[in-house]
Image (tube, rainbow, N blue to C red):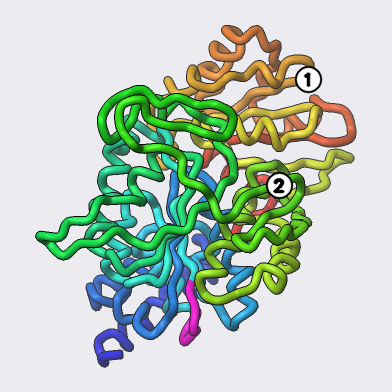
Amino acid sequence: MPLRAKVASSVSRTAAALSRAAGRGDGSVIGGWIGLKIDPDLLAHLSAGRAIALVSGTNGKTTTTRLTTAAVGVLGRVATNSFGANMPTGHTSALAKAGSTPYAVLEVDEHYLAQVLEATEPHVVALLNLSRDQLDRAKEVAMMAQLWRAALVRHPDVRVVANADDPMVVWAATPPADPAQGHVPPHVTWFSAGQRWHDDSWVCPECGSTIQRSGEQWWCTGCPLRRPQPQWTVEDDGVLDPTGAWHKVQLQLPGKVNLGNAATALAVAAEFGVRPVDAVSRLGVVTSVAGRYAQVDRDGRNIRLLLAKNPASWLEAFDMADVAPTLLSINARDPDGLDTSWLFDVDFSPLAGRQVLITGDRAYDLAVRLDVNGVPFQHVRTFDDAVRAVPPGRLEVIANYTAFQDIRAELDRVN
């Protein structure tokens, strides 16, 4: 690297280490921020010489990145932003901290994918899903798909691993060829992990006609856009690869959605030449991802933490959670988005019949929503109150971002 980049990288590592030593967090943002102030091209310099995979989407990025890192680890050391700092500052800090590695797997905020594609020149990009999220400040779903599509047009050589079940992702991943500009569509490998949330993909992003569905299939009623044939699919408790071979996946992470994340990880690793048979056993060592799915024993209760930040992820959280006492916690701070009206897009009826407790800055918003769904609940002011209010045994905790971090801090599970 140029001397300036070497200095910037060294300062980045030092700043991150000081932040950790001071108990101010893991340093994954401040280290990258300072490094980029010294050398604005530091991320590009740190990316040079590495085979890189980028993982982006509305939901599942952190978990899929962690599983992909484990799978690609068959080949050697892998740099990754394991704590979920998924903007360029986090990527810069992660690569600087890792030093020289042949591979990197980076989670990327969907709004920054075009910028990070430009800086890192990755070997492969995984596109997971697109759904509504923080619409008070973020882009509408079809706009996000358009940005992805435009970014891929500018990088026709990148290999893409994309979700065949999400019409928005399929459209974004298949930009048309433009012979006048010399653009060709990217190479795309399709995976199928199922799509339980459909409310952001009833209208075709190409022509505006209705999207129809029948079983696993979907198609536009007004143009040729339709579900492509996936090469990687989830079947029972395993994954079918492009050869038709079935691989049993034994995860320590709950829910069918994580089988889909595992299929994605195997598909991305295969783009680096990793055989599924060599990678699949490594997926089972992942137990907790930046606190997600962590289980903590406290006062006779086994507490499991689940993160849910938008309607699609709440739907998956209900599928993961056991039928047990459940604490729901909602904040509306800046990282969460300030608008809680999205709660009315979530069907809370799966919680009927269990003990439900609510807390958080916006617990009263949640109370109104549960009342509309006819789900009885108890309001508690603190996490300790919630623990005392439930009998010994399992306590499921489902929280949005800052509420999740507050509870992690109470359980002494800070990064």
Can residue 236 be seen by looking at this rendering? yes
Q: Residue 382 lies in what quarter of the image?
A: top right
Residue at 78% over, 48% down: 296
Residue tagged by mark 2?
235
Residue at 51% over, 47% down: 229
Q: Is residue 51 magenta?
A: no
| Range covered by the magenta-colored residues | 98-104
Residue 126, horizontal then vertical, whole percent = 46, 57
Q: Is residue 310 above or below residue 25?
A: above
Residue 113, horizontal then vertical, whole percent = 33, 56
Residue at 51% over, 36% down: 309
> Mark 2 or 1 closer to N-term?
2
Residue 63, horizontal then vertical, whole percent = 59, 54
Q: Is disc 1 surrounded by few (<14), some (14 to 19) or many (20+) residues within 10 Å? A: some
Residue 246, horizontal then vertical, whole percent = 73, 58
Q: Secondary structure at mark 1?
A: loop
Q: Amino acid at mark 2?
A: Glu
Q: Which mark is residue 354?
A: 1
